[in-house]
């Protein structure tokens, strides 16, 4: 005789319903996932659920490091670590959100839109389910929630993972080598064209668009690859037509690998974004 | 197509419905063949050409072996069948390794163009199935068996259909388990809906998806840091924890896949062999290989180790055979010298263990010694996985240097917490197996049938609430 599957389905239903009910009424909001990818998804899901910020930043893992608490409630950091600014802009465009200002990072333009990430964020019925049931949102899974609760109870801050100084020097040397040659013209032009098209769509909806280049290690600033990238971006989005933020770290940026800012510098740059955002909104 | 893709579930539902609409074996084979081809061709349709050619070669040669009336032609067809399958595997899988080692082809030349052909998914599995088919038929005929391992067939067309089905059956097409022809062909017959073993299928599917989606996919988000330059930011202790996590991840990924394949096959009335049996409780390397990827171990034993003479030709030859079989097994996993080294790593461990098996260390029944034996096996196996994670030797060296340089770095607590959380079910799964004989207590209750249903329910709940971002199955690359 076959065994019944009834106990399996009943206990699964009880586990899911019980956990969903518990999480739905939690008195706090989870702001960090178990890893960068989950934090990407969590920030994006938060924005899609309540697109209240009037300014949205689209970028790569470089912008991802600008801390949301410093950026404040008016600026949403929609940068995708491991992705490109095009993914963030496409998300804004497809979600129907209408922020007043979209700020686009131009440091890393070698990647195009990440279709899989967009699909998983916008797909029916997952998006609608996530917006109404917290337990289905990234970050509200049992393991992450347990970790956040333990962290809060122990008053532990997030750990900043910084390589040893020797390792940083090696990473910068590797970056130097990689950035010494001009970027692949075909993919750069394709990605710039894609961003330009998205920018036009947003502008047609009345959204202002601005750009920014995040400071990187001074040894990498003037390499051939960087110069060519800067020239191509300026040609496509000239400062007399678009608002450009001027972000810098006095004495040169401190990074963990040549590109990604250390926490103190990321805070400083985030402050500059907050200050210069108003000018962009008025321009 | 992945077992975790949404489109796969649509294909599965449609296939299941059509399959049981008809009651003849011909109809059911046709439905599964079409579904299997769609499954395989979904991402790269052109790979169907190679799969079809490979299947046709295995069909023709096995048919001729079956029908040959004397030894010489039978042997010739069998050799041709094995050789052709090995050639297909060598050409499409090992071409780059061969070219990179011995030639320096220009990317625009003919050789460069041939080398640009991507590795066909599942080629290692369907060529091994093809070899198994030819060899099983040949051995049965050589032994004078009157009953063919292929069962009763009605001519070449019938044989073709069965063989194409055997080689392409979608649950085992791209990553096994490797099922031997003599175990599969007798199962090919009309199946009835009322005979489906629902509980067995559901159990295999739930545990499989739990291991893959909850354990392996979440751990994958932690273990990528073993790759330089990410490893630079982590202390040696953190990296050791991550290495442990990779050991758990690779088990969960592959055992999960195998269980899903077994569960899916059960829905269509077919039994695939078990592929994993609590491998991380092994106290010896030889025991490990009777518990890890069992279908490959059995294949290598039956079709390579025994034909080489196994352990029947003296101790020295046995050591050579062990090293050779394990090196070949390593190369089967991937076309890179690092995989061969990984195989030799295990081959050496097996050979050393064989040499020491009469010593107190291997004969002692003391709990402390047993624990030491277990720790040794787990450590050696886990270190070996580095070659899987980082097939580039330079990266392995870099990771080793980082381990040393970062030995005094601060231990970060966050990631190990997650590793602990996701590894716990796998550790408990192995521990419970060790305690299966306990007459009373929590372990006895968990082993009882009363606890199994609710436990599976909790796993199903975890699949819904805690699944990680889907990653390709690690063994798909092989």
Image: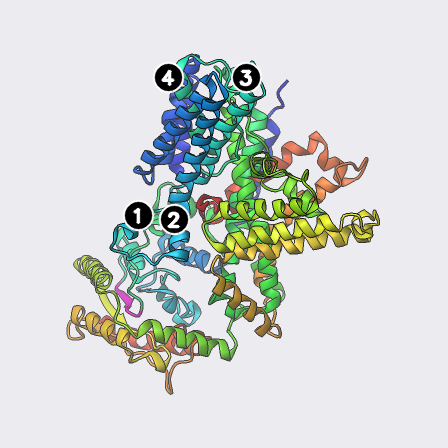
Residue B157 numbered mark, or none: 4
Q: Residue at x 41, y 76 (%)?
A: A172
Foreground of the two, A110 or A263:
A110
- Nearer the N terminus, badge 3 or badge 2? 2
* Relative side of A185 to A53, left or right: left
Q: CA distance from mark 4 to mark 3?
A: 28 Å
Question: In the image, which disc is placed on residue B114?
Answer: 1
Q: Chain of mark 4?
A: B
Label whose residue precedes the other's in the sequence (2 or 1): 2
Identify the subunit bearing mark 3: B
Circles 3 and 2: CB distance less than 8 Å?
no
Give the foreground label among 3 and 2: 2
Camera-side residue: B430 or B202? B430
The verdict on a common chain for dots 2 and 4 is: yes
Asked if the stretch drawn in magenta spans residue A45, the answer is no
Give above or below for A145 relative to A15.
below
> In this figure, which residue is indicated by the disc labeled 3?
B195
Q: Say which mark, if any, is on residue A159.
A: none
Can the viewer see residue B135 in this picture? yes
In-front residue for pair A131/B333 = B333
- Mark before the other along the chain sequence, 4 or 1: 1
- The stretch in magenta equals A100-107
Residue position for label 2: B95
On the image, the x and y values in percent for residue B318 come to 66, 44
Q: Which mark sits nearer the N-terminus, 4 or 3?
A: 4
- Residue drawn where x is 42% and y is 41% of the image: B89
The chain ID associated with circle 1 is B
Q: Confirm or deny contact between disc 2 and disc 1 (CB under 8 A).
A: yes
Disc 4 vs disc 1: Cβ atoms closer than 8 Å? no
Residue B75 place in picture, x, y as percent: 48, 26
Q: Is residue A96 left or right of residue B418?
A: left
């Amino acid at each position: 005789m076959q065994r019944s599957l009834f106990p399996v389905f009943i206990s699964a239903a009880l586990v899911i319903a019980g956990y969903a009910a518990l999480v739905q009424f939690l008195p706090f909001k989870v702001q960090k996932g178990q890893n960068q990818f989950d934090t990407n998804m969590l920030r994006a899901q938060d924005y899609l659920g309540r697109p209240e910020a009037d300014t949205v930043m689209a970028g790569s893992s470089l912008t991802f490091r600008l801390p949301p608490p410093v950026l404040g409630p008016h600026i949403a950091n929609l940068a995708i670590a491991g992705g490109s600014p095009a993914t963030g802009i496409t998300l804004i465009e497809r979600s129907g959100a209408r922020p007043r200002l979209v700020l686009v990072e131009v440091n890393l333009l070698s990647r195009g839109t990440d279709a899989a990430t967009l699909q998983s964020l916008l797909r029916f019925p997952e998006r609608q389910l996530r917006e109404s049931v917290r337990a289905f949102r990234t970050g509200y899974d049992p393991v992450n929630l347990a970790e956040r609760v333990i962290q809060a109870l122990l008053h532990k801050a997030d750990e900043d993972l910084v390589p040893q100084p020797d390792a940083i020097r090696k990473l910068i040397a590797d970056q130097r080598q990689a950035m010494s040659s001009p970027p692949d013209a075909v993919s750069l032009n394709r990605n710039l064209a894609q961003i330009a098209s998205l920018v036009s769509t947003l502008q047609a909806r009345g959204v202002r668009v601005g750009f920014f280049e995040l400071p990187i290690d001074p040894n990498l600033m003037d390499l051939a690859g960087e110069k060519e990238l800067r020239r191509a971006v300026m040609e496509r989005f000239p400062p007399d037509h678009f608002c450009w933020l001027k972000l810098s770290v006095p004495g040169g940026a401190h990074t963990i690998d040549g590109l990604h800012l250390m926490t103190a510098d990321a805070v400083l740059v985030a402050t500059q974004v907050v200050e210069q955002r108003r000018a962009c909104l008025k321009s | 197509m992945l077992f975790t893709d949404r489109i796969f579930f649509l294909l599965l539902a449609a296939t299941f419905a059509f399959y049981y609409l008809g009651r003849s074996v011909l109809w059911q084979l046709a439905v599964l063949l079409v579904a299997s081809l769609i499954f395989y061709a979904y991402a790269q349709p052109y790979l169907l050409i190679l799969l079809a050619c490979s299947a046709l070669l295995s069909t023709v040669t096995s048919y001729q072996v079956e029908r040959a009336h004397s030894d010489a032609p039978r042997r010739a067809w069998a050799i041709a069948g094995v050789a052709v399958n090995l050639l297909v595997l060598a050409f499409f899988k090992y071409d780059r390794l061969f070219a990179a080692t011995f030639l320096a082809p220009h990317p625009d030349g003919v050789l460069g163009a041939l080398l640009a052909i991507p590795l066909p998914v599942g080629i290692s599995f369907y060529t091994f199935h093809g070899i198994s088919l030819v060899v099983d038929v040949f051995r049965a005929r050589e032994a004078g068996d009157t009953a063919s391992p292929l069962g009763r067939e009605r001519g070449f067309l019938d044989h073709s259909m069965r063989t194409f089905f055997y080689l392409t059956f979608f649950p085992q097409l791209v990553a096994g388990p490797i099922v031997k022809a003599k175990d599969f062909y007798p199962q090919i017959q009309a199946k009835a809906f009322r005979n489906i073993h629902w509980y067995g299928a559901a159990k295999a599917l739930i545990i499989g998806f739990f291991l893959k989606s909850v354990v392996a996919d979440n751990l994958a988000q932690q273990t990528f840091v073993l790759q330089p330059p990410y490893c630079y930011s982590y202390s040696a202790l953190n990296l050791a924890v991550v290495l442990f996590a990779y050991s758990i991840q690779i088990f969960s990924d592959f055992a999960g896949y195998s269980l899903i394949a077994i569960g899916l096959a059960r829905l269509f009335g077919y039994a695939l062999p078990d592929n994993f049996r609590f491998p991380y409780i092994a106290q010896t390397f030889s025991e490990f290989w009777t518990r890890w990827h069992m279908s490959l171990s059995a294949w290598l034993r039956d079709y390579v180790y025994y034909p080489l003479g196994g352990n029947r030709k003296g101790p020295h030859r046995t050591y050579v055979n062990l090293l050779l079989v394990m090196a070949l097994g390593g190369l089967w996993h991937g076309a890179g010298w690092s995989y061969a080294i990984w195989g030799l790593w295990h081959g050496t461990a097996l050979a050393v263990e064989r040499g020491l098996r009469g010593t107190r260390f291997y004969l002692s029944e003391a709990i402390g010694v047993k624990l030491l034996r277990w720790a040794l096996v787990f450590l050696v196996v886990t270190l070996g996985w580095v070659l899987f994670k980082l097939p580039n030797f330079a990266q392995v060296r870099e990771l080793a240097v980082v381990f040393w340089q970062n030995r005094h770095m601060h231990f970060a607590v966050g990631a190990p917490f997650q590793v602990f959380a996701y590894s716990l079910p796998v550790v408990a799964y192995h521990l419970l197996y060790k305690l299966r004989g306990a007459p009373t207590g929590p372990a006895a209750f968990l082993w009882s049938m009363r606890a199994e249903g609710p436990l599976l329910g909790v796993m199903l709940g975890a699949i819904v609430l805690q699944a990680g971002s889907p990653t390709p199955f690690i063994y798909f690359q092989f």
